Amino acid sequence: MAKIKFLSVLLISLFIAQVLTAQDKSSFDRGTYISKGDTLPYRILFPKDFDPAKKYPLILVLHGAGERGNNNESQLAYGTKTFLKDTIREKYAAIVVYPQCPENGWWANNKFEEDSITHKTKFIFQHDAPPTKAMVSLLGLLDQLLDKPYINKHMVYVGGLSMGGMGTFEIIARRPKVFAAAFAICGGDNTLNVKKYAKKVPLWVFHGAKDSIVPEFHSESIVAAIKNAGGDPKFTVYPNDDHNSWDDAFREPLLIPWLFSHTK
C-alpha cells in the first residue's frame, strides 16, 4: 500500500512539473517573420510589467539542429528556465527571442562530410560564404526587432547551442557592429572569419571535453584564433560533458551578468 501511495505521489509530482513547465514556456508569445514567401517562426519573452515607453536589452537565442521545424515550440527546449527565473527577469529585464530554423535549414553556411574511419559527420566551416535562407530570415527578423522603439540598441546580445553556436559565430561576423556580446555553446567556425568579430564582440565560448557530435577542438581553435586576432574571449570547457554542455552553460550564474556587463 505504501508503495502504491509513493508511486501515486510521484506521478502527481511529475504531472505538476510538466504543467508548470508548459505554463512557463507559454510566457513566450508567438510570432512569425515573413519576407518574400519565407517564414521564420519565433517566440518572444517580454519583461514583467513591460512598458513600451522604456528601452530594453535584446537577447537572441539560437537552437540546435534537433529543434528545427515549424511548430514554433521545439526551439524552447533549452535555456528557457534561465530566462524565466524571477531573479533574472527582475534584475536583468530583457526581451528574449527564440527563432526556429526550418526543418531542412541551417543557421550557418556549413558543409558536411562523413569521416571515412569513424563514420561521424565532419563539419566543414566556410569562409566568406553567402548566408543560408535561414540566416537571411534571421537577419531580417533582427532588423525588424531593432526597428522597435523599445529595443536598447546598445545592449543587443546573441547566443546559441550546437548548430546555434555555429550560427552565433556567423551572425556576429555579419553584424559585428550590432552585438554587444555573444555566447557560443558547442559550436564552431572557420578561423579565417574571426578577424571580423575578434576585437568587436566579446565572446564566452563553452564546450564539453567529451563532445561526440561537435568535437571540442572546434571551439578551441576558434578561441586561439580570436586571441591571435587581438580578442580576449572567455572559454569554459566542462571536462565530463558530452554534447549537452548547454545544460551546464545555461546554469552558469555569471552568464547573464556577464552579457549585461557589455554595451556598444
Image (spheres, rainbow, N blue to C red):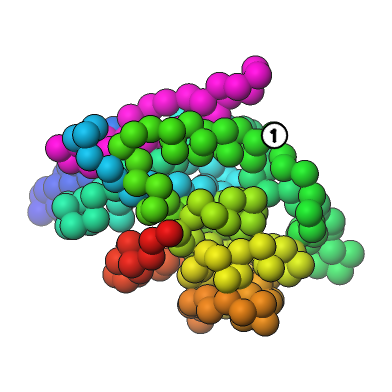
Q: Which residue lies at the image location 86% right of the left edge and 69% below the top edge?
A: 117
**Residue type marked 1:** Lys
Magenta stretch: includes residue 224: no
Whole-percent x and y of residue 260?
A: 33, 62
Whole-percent x and y of residue 74?
A: 47, 38
Please name whichever residue, 171 or 63, is drawn nearer the observer in this view of the structure: 171
Determine which quarter of the picture holds residue 107: top right
Determine which quarter of the picture holds residue 121: bottom right
In-image side of 42 versus 46 (left or right)? right
Whole-percent x and y of residue 158?
A: 47, 53
In-image side of 134 versus 116 (left or right)? left
Please name whichever residue, 238 or 187, is drawn nearer the observer in this view of the structure: 187
Above or below, comparing residue 70 to residue 220 in the picture: above
Q: Which segment did they paint magenta? A: 27-50
Above or below, comparing residue 221 to residue 149 in the picture: below
Q: Is residue 60 visible?
A: yes
Whole-percent x and y of residue 35?
A: 60, 22
In-image side of 147 versus 131 (left or right)? left
Q: Which residue lies at the image location 61% right of the left edge and 64% below the top edge?
A: 197
Above or below, comparing residue 180 to residue 221 in the picture: above
Q: Is residue 73 visible?
A: no
* Label 1 element class: helix
Above or below, comparing residue 3 to residue 134 in the picture: below
Which residue is farthest top? 37
Q: Which residue is mark 1?
A: 133
